[in-house]
Image (cartoon, grey):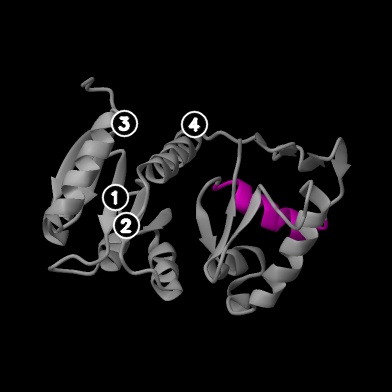
Amino acid sequence: MSAEAPLVLLIEDEPPMRRFLRAALGAGSFRLVEAATAREGLAQAASRAPDLILLDLGLPDADGIEVTRNIREWSAVPIIVLSARGQEVDKVAALDAGADDYLTKPFGVEELLARMRAAFRRAARTDANAEPIVTADGIRIDLSQRRVFAKGGEVHLTPLEYKLLTTLARHPGKVLTHRQLLKEVWGPNAATQTHYLRVYMTQLRHKLEEDAARPRVLLTEPGVGYRFVAD
């Protein structure tokens, strides 16, 4: 396998899951390094500088959320959490700690690979300081000119609608929690006012989506937050 293939660090204590992911990622042309504990995982993250981390929450020596917080103190490497914990509170906690995405076990290989590709694209845009144009299913956002186009023409957005849209668009494919969006758009004092988000997301969908009742770009992660799906 080419040394240029992306290096993925898997921090997972269950041997069957490691075997499953080893086969899946090998077929997807990734280099893989494995760790069975939080301590080993943190050491590998520091020494190997992986391009992406797959992280189980239920590690024997520490909680994966604490591992995420630790890594976020010194690295922006994409982190996708893999966990049997399907509760919304666990997803929110992991994402608020700095994870980029969350998959609940069991999951399909194709979905995992799609989430990984999205994380790599997002990291590449960040590394290149790429702005200025974001496109998604007929929606075009010109970040440098602060203009938005959809449904064949320019769309007028209020300042708050624009800020909410661009906050999501700057992290395409990443789940942003209610708390993250509220703090970013409305400020820290609004972190619990989730009704703001519902109202403004409904307005954005009506202005931008071809079918507001079946959005394809501004997706809801129930109980957790929202995701912007770019081209």
Residue 45 is at least partly visible in this image:
no
Of circles 1 and 2, the one toward us is 2
User: x, y percentage for residue 142?
Assistant: 73, 37
Disc 3 target residue: 28
User: Which residue is rendered at x = 58% and y = 68% of the image?
Assistant: 183
Residue picked out by circle 2: 82
Marks 1/2: CA distance?
Answer: 7 Å
Give the alpha-carbon distance from disc 2 to disc 4, as whole Å: 28 Å
Q: CA distance from mark 3 to mark 4?
A: 24 Å
Kindly report the secondary structure that dominates the magenta region of the rendered protein. helix
Separation of residues labelled 1 and 3 (CA atoms): 15 Å
> From the viewer's perspective, is residue 20 above or below residue 117?
below
Q: Amino acid at mark 1?
A: Leu
- For the residue marked with disc 3, what is the amino acid? Gly
Q: Quadrant of residue 24?
A: top left
- Left or right of 153 on screen, residue 37: left
Q: Identify which amino acid the numbered label 2 is placed on.
A: Leu
Q: In the rendering, at what x and y percent does residue 160 appear?
A: 75, 61
Q: CA distance from mark 4 to mark 1?
A: 23 Å
In terms of depth relative to the viewer, which is nearer, 77 or 103?
A: 103
* Residue bearing mark 1: 54
Q: Pick the residue in front: 15 or 166.
A: 15
Q: Residues within 10 Å of mark 4 (few under 14, many from 20)?
A: few
Q: Are marks 1 and 2 in contact (CB under 8 Å)?
A: yes
> Which quarter of the figure has residue 25?
top left
The answer to if 108 sits in the magenta stretch is no
Task: Give whichever of 53, 189 is nearer the camera.
Answer: 53
Q: Which residue is mark 4?
A: 128
Residue 82 image point, x, y percent:
32, 57
Dot 2: what SS? Answer: strand
At x 81%, y 39%, the residue is: 149
Name which residue type carries label 4.
Ala
